[in-house]
């Protein structure tokens, strides 16, 4: 039996989340943390969340973000930032730190970046440099206002939510004099638009209602443009009150050069280079990750206050005498309190490992995506259909690369691996397939299941949990989770996205390699839960393949895009598998790299023992969910025949057409048996919580 | 007149004060339970000294600031991710224990030797800064000894304010009893100043400064030489956390006047 000596610190996180060598990221973490646990926590403790209005008190947040460099984090050094290259991972780390105290503050920090993201991803170089530089705090010697932006997509009114296919913002030509820049009239109403109290510019999605403009596009609107820039009424949201949201009314005349990405004039018609879907696709590809991470951060943040509450529960008063187990351990003398907290912690770790894995992939994917576009442009392959055709022909190379990628370094053909690694299109096909699953997967599972788990955190603190001054702000965090599950596309949107990406051959090939990888982990790292993850993945893959061809008893196809009772359920099941896989990878990284850290060496075996158990617990839970969903889908669309003459209830031979499911039953039995040890893991991890050293007090105010 | 200073700040790390600090016996004397695994911060007294040093250097162009730290380099590196964003400085590391159970004389000797090894340090411009106390259970005497070892006889402790005159004279306010200050004037550097809290707030993080600092300071951390603190004859017979006394009595149905009366009697002793 091991002892968890202390709560995991920065040195543990840096190894697991792979930024031990990046001091720029480590500094960003420290900056964000200092604001979270001072400015942000003070605002929450003082009740700043209790109003919809953006107050002077809340405005302190922006000053704190500016002073500490968080405002400039999104920019490149030549634009006034300090991190070169993609910043998805950096933004994810900041979101994690801020959401540790309040996710509304994290949203506030990210909102300007969301407004800039369309410009960053698809804007012209001039648009990029102009707006990014404006949004950086003034440098020494400069005297200027810091610009802030808002992102206006929400459609259609009056509802709050995103159906990106429906637009009611309109664009028409206001003036167009020969030889001059056309002037556009933009009419846009927004709902639930973040940063709207102070935004200097809005990046808005609109569609043409003029024959002289083609299709949809995104456009930049400034508060000084001619016309109406009415910030609107505050949105009466009940959560995330440290972010500003209003329902603006915008009717402005702007030059066509504000069309994001530019435009061409073809036969007298303005043809935007990118339609709004292309831009939004590029933006949401990445920005959903930190939103998912916010929920997971809150789960881990709940661990310390819950332990403190449990230990101190009976101290004071007549409930127990000093020195008694009840006095020393409080509620921790009860197994249930310990093990439910372990479940919560495991869930938070799995969510974080998944989200940070996705954000690291996004950083690698950014330059590849740009290189792919440049390649196709140079080759003259401009239509999406032709590009897909080219990529399809590379399938064998992509599979070969994936096999090499998941082969241990010492065993693979390094020359061939390097060759395929430098092939832009192969890399694009691999990363696009993986990101296509991870990004909606993070958003779906972390926020949805995270909200359920956060309710458990509140429950673990009893009646104290539902008070405003509960340490750790657990009640506020729980309610905030629901907005995170909604932001940037609610759960149904993520499920729909997954149903389209999870069936790709490339992702399926990746998963086959994950299965092998987890089987090896099961053998080489006992107690991690590798086997149970692998067997659950096998069951999921088998079920997917079965459902693609199977029909229900009425003869209707099961796997069909209209049949969300099947497809969405499989997306949910996949969501469960992603977290434990990435957690297992992170725990193995800790086992490998931990011994090199002088600060961890002393208690490393205990620490890795605990993490292996957390991973095993989460793996078993995920496998249980996957098995349940797969079983319901495989058997649930056939009529029960147990009431037929001579039939026996539960008799497999009488269950119509079930003889073909021998493989399924074998795989499911394997999942069941691979649960071996998972409850012992929970016993050990729960016991570790009774001994772990926690700080004397929370490091931020609690009201 | 140009007043350039070479400001050396001595300061190391201490466990985050919110952590549970439990002493226990180690193979070489007392240690703190799980000290290497606990989060650490820059000693708050040294922090005040560093921010004063940076402010002084900013007001006197040409001045330089070094932060000399005796501590475990892996922990120092973590702490520097926050501290390096506060002010420009060059880090000089002696890799050794920052435990408060170390011998103050050995610590001073190591710091003095490390300071003497700083390339380009002009002793005639030297202002040696540090905390007048330490949050690491330290002796509160290290700065005086470092000064003596470096031959610096102008020493001030409990400093809250330093003003540099146009002629380069240093006016120092030291805390004395009764909330009063003693004002002293020294003609010029070198001098030792053990800072109390000073009068500057903690600067906000500035990642631009942090990036510049860490590009220089990461090599300093990686190349840090092990500190030799073995010459001590210090022995500890026992170490204990100060005991917290709490006597709780639950009183019900007693008029407030009687509760007040009892409290007054208790206060009177």
Image (cartoon, rainbow, N blue to C red):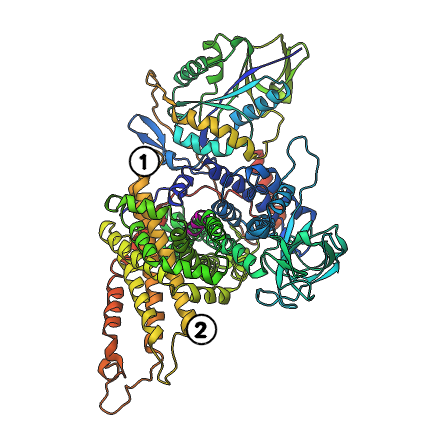
Q: Is disc 1 placed on a helix, strand or loop?
A: helix
Q: Is residue A502 magenta?
A: no
**In magenta segment, residue A362:** yes
Q: Residue at x 59, y 50 (%)?
A: A123
Which residue is labeled 2 in the image? Answer: A561
Tag nearer the camera, 1 or 2: 2
The quarter holding residue A272 reads bottom right
When asked about the image quadrant of residue A563, the answer is bottom left
Q: Which mark is residue A596?
A: 1
Residue at x 55% of width, y 40% of height: A76
Please state which of residues B73 and B154 is positioned toward the viewer in this rendering: B73
Bounds of the magenta span?
A357-364
Q: Can see residue B170?
A: yes
Residue A441 makes an appearance in the image: no
Residue A554: % across, % down: 37, 85
Q: Is residue A673 above or below residue B26?
A: below
Q: Position of residue A251 (x, y in %)?
A: 74, 59
Q: Are marks 1 and 2 in contact (CB under 8 Å)?
A: no
Q: Chain of mark 1?
A: A
């Amino acid at each position: 039996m091991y002892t968890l000596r202390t709560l995991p610190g920065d040195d543990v996180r840096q190894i697991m989340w792979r930024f031990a060598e990046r001091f720029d990221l480590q500094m960003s973490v420290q900056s964000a943390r200092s604001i979270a646990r001072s400015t942000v926590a003070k605002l929450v403790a003082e009740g700043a969340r209790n109003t919809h209005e953006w107050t002077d008190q809340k405005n302190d947040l922006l000053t704190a973000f500016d002073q500490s460099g968080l405002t400039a984090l999104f920019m490149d050094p030549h634009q006034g930032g300090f991190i070169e290259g993609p910043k998805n991972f950096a933004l994810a780390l900041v979101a994690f730190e801020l959401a540790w105290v309040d996710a509304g503050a994290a949203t506030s920090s990210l909102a300007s970046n969301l407004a800039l993201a369309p410009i960053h991803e698809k804007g012209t170089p001039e648009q990029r440099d102009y707006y990014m530089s404006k949004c950086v705090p003034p440098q020494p010697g400069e005297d200027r206002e810091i610009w802030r932006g808002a992102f206006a997509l929400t459609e259609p009114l009056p509802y709050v939510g995103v159906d990106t296919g429906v637009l009611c913002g309109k664009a028409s030509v206001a003036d167009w004099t020969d030889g001059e820049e056309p002037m556009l009239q933009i009419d846009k109403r927004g709902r639930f638009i973040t940063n709207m109290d102070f935004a200097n510019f809005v990046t808005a999605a609109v569609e043409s209602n003029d024959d002289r403009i083609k299709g949809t596009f995104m456009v930049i609107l400034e508060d000084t443009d001619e016309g109406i820039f009415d910030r609107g009424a505050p949105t009466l949201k009940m959560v995330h009150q440290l972010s500003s949201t209003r329902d603006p009314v915008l009717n402005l005349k702007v030059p066509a050069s504000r069309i994001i990405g530019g435009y061409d004039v073809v036969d007298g018609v303005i043809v935007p280079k990118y339609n709004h879907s292309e831009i939004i696709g590029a933006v949401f590809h990445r920005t959903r990750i930190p939103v998912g991470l916010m929920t997971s951060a809150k789960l881990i943040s709940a661990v310390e206050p819950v332990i403190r509450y449990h230990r101190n529960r009976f101290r004071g008063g007549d409930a127990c005498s000093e020195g008694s187990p009840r006095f020393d351990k409080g509620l921790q003398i009860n197994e249930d309190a310990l093990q439910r907290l372990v479940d919560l912690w495991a869930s938070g770790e799995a969510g974080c490992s998944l989200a940070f894995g996705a954000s690291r992939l996004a950083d690698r994917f950014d330059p590849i995506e740009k290189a792919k576009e440049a390649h196709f442009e140079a080759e003259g392959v401009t239509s999406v259909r032709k590009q897909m055709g080219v990529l399809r022909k590379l399938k064998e190379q992509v599979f070969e690369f994936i096999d090499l990628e998941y082969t241990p370094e010492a065993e693979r053909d390094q020359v061939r691996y390097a060759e395929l690694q430098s092939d832009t299109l192969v890399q694009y096909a691999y990363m696009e397939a993986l990101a296509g699953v991870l990004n909606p997967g993070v958003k779906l599972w972390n926020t949805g299941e995270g909200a359920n788990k956060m309710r458990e955190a509140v429950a673990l603190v009893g009646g104290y949990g539902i008070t405003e001054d509960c340490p750790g702000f657990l009640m506020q965090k729980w309610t905030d989770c629901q907005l995170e599950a909604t932001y940037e596309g609610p759960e149904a949107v993520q499920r729909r996205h997954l149903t389209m990406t999870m069936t790709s051959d490339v992702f399926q090939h990746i998963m086959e390699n994950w299965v092998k990888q987890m089987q090896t982990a099961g053998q080489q790292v006992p107690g991690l839960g590798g086997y149970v993850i692998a067997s659950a993945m096998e069951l999921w893959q088998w079920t997917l393949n079965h459902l693609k061809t199977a029909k229900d008893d009425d003869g209707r196809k099961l796997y069909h895009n209209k049949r969300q009772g099947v497809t969405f359920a499989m997306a949910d099941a996949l969501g469960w598998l992603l977290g434990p896989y990435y957690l297992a990878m992170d725990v193995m990284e800790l086992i490998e790299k931990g011994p090199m850290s002088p600060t961890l060496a002393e208690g490393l075996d205990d620490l890795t023992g605990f993490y292996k158990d957390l991973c095993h617990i989460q793996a078993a839970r995920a496998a249980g969910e996957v098995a349940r969903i797969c079983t319901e889908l495989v058997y649930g669309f056939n009529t029960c025949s147990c009431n037929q003459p001579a039939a026996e209830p539960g008799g497999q031979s009488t269950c119509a057409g079930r003889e073909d499911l021998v493989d399924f039953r074998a795989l499911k039995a394997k999942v069941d048996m691979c649960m071996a040890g998972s409850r012992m893991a929970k016993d050990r991890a729960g016991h570790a919580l009774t001994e772990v050293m926690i700080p004397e007090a929370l490091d931020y105010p609690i009201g | 007149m140009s007043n350039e200073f070479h400001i050396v700040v001595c300061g190391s790390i201490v466990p985050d004060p919110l952590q549970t600090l439990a002493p226990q016996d180690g193979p070489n004397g007392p240690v703190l339970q799980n000290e290497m695994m606990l989060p650490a911060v820059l000693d708050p007294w040294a922090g005040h000294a560093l921010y004063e040093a940076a402010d002084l250097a900013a007001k006197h162009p040409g001045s330089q600031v070094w932060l000399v730290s005796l501590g475990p380099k892996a922990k120092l590196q973590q702490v520097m991710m926050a501290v390096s964003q506060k002010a420009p400085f060059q880090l000089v590391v002696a890799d050794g224990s920052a435990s408060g159970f170390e011998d103050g004389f050995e610590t001073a000797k190591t710091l003095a030797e490390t300071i003497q090894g700083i390339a380009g340090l002009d002793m005639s411009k030297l202002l040696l800064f540090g905390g007048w106390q330490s949050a690491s259970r330290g002796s509160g005497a290290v700065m005086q000894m470092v000064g003596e070892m470096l031959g610096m006889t102008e020493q001030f402790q409990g400093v809250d304010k330093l003003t540099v005159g146009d002629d380069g004279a240093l006016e120092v306010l030291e805390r004395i009893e009764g909330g009063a200050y003693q004002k002293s004037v020294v003609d010029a550097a070198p001098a030792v100043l053990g800072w109390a809290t000073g009068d500057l707030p903690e600067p906000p993080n500035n990642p631009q400064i942090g990036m510049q600092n860490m590009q220089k300071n990461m090599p300093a951390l990686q190349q840090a030489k092990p500190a030799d603190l073995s010459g001590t004859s210090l022995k500890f017979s026992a170490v204990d956390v100060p005991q917290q006394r709490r006597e709780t009595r639950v009183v019900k149905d007693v008029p407030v006047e009687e509760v007040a009366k009892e409290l007054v009697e208790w206060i009177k002793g």
